[in-house]
Amino acid sequence: MNTRLKFSIVFLGLIILCLNTFAQKRSGNNHNPVFEGWYADPEGIVFGDEYWIYPTYSAPYNDQIFMDCFSSKDLVTWTKHERIIDTTAVKWAWRAMWAPAIVEKEGKYFLFFAANDIQSNDEVGGIGIGVANKPEGPYKDYLGKPLIDKFYNGAQPIDQFVFHDKDGQYYMFYGGWRHCNIVKLNNDFTGFVPFEDGETFKEVTPEGYVEGPFMFIRNGRYYFMWSEGGWTGPDYSVAYAIADSPFGPFERVGTILKQDENVARGAGHHSVIQVPGTDEYYIVYHRRPLNETDGNHRETCIDRMYFDDEGFIKPVKITFEGVQARPIN
């Protein structure tokens, strides 16, 4: 086979792949991605009878100076709320605002975020908090400074997740650079309470951990999840462990979310939504379309997440179809 014919076959294959992907995404029965635009690191949560997603605006770091969020009554039709927080409201932040986490406490909404992508203790940045009276903001800087601006146990201060335990205590898991810490938040989220052993930053890094921690409770067991691999690469994926407490130990069970060469690449950095009062779970995550090579071209998707009879998470099938409408009763 001559070179020109080989090139023609490869070129035709690429055209077919792009047209097929476009056609699948345009189908009225397909709901992934769940909204338009490049968005990553989605935090999914329920407030009242609405679903909310708080993602990273996926762009070059110097353009990541604001955050949008999205709300839905049924997981299918989403309303965009623009610029709920930006660097004009957070004077110490100037780029790389990403990976939001949010909780509601006593009528206030606290939006945790990372900013500036600091590489050492000598730089300004880290994990901050915005506060608002409504889920859609607008959010203002809660502390006027980062909550965490230093490296502890080797963990870069990014990718925070705030976990509300069944006893009412709030913990924060966070960390990049393959290290994960847990801290115990004080009552007003202005700082931390040391653990009984005197430690404030307790490392809980499981095997394979890279970034993006998340935790939920099901049937009294603590499911700890995280992202592995490189965020721009095809090996980006989600793994998990199960423990009897939020402190572990977390023994890796396996991978439950990864790319599918027929759907998308680099599926990772997720969160989990439980429909209130049910055993229905949905995984919210980002992935990169097959025809995209730009690392920042990531889109937010939702698929169902199931468990086997022993409580282990079944591998998630990533789809174009996504999920059907599911209002909260």
Image (cartoon, rainbow, N blue to C red):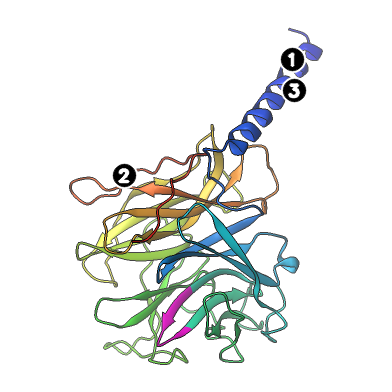
Pick whichever of labels 1 and 3 is earlier in the sequence.
1
Residue type, numbered disc 1: Lys
Identity of the residue drawn at 40% across and 81% down: 201
Q: Which residue is mark 1?
A: 6
Residue 300, x across and y down, in percent: 56, 53
> Which element is circle 3 on?
helix
Q: Which residue is mark 2?
A: 314
What's the magenta bit mostly, secondary-structure-wise?
A: strand
Q: Which mark is residue 11?
A: 3
Query: 288 left or right of 65?
Result: left
Q: Residue at x 18, y 49 (%)?
A: 310
- Where in the figure is residue 307, as x and y percent of width and height? 27, 48
Residue 164 can be seen in this image: yes
Q: Give the image location of residue 290, x and y in percent.
A: 62, 37
Q: Is residue 85 left or right of residue 155?
A: right
* Residues packed near mark 2 inside 10 Å, few (<14), some (14 to 19) or many (20 plus): some
> Looking at the image, which residue is at 31% across and 83% down?
169
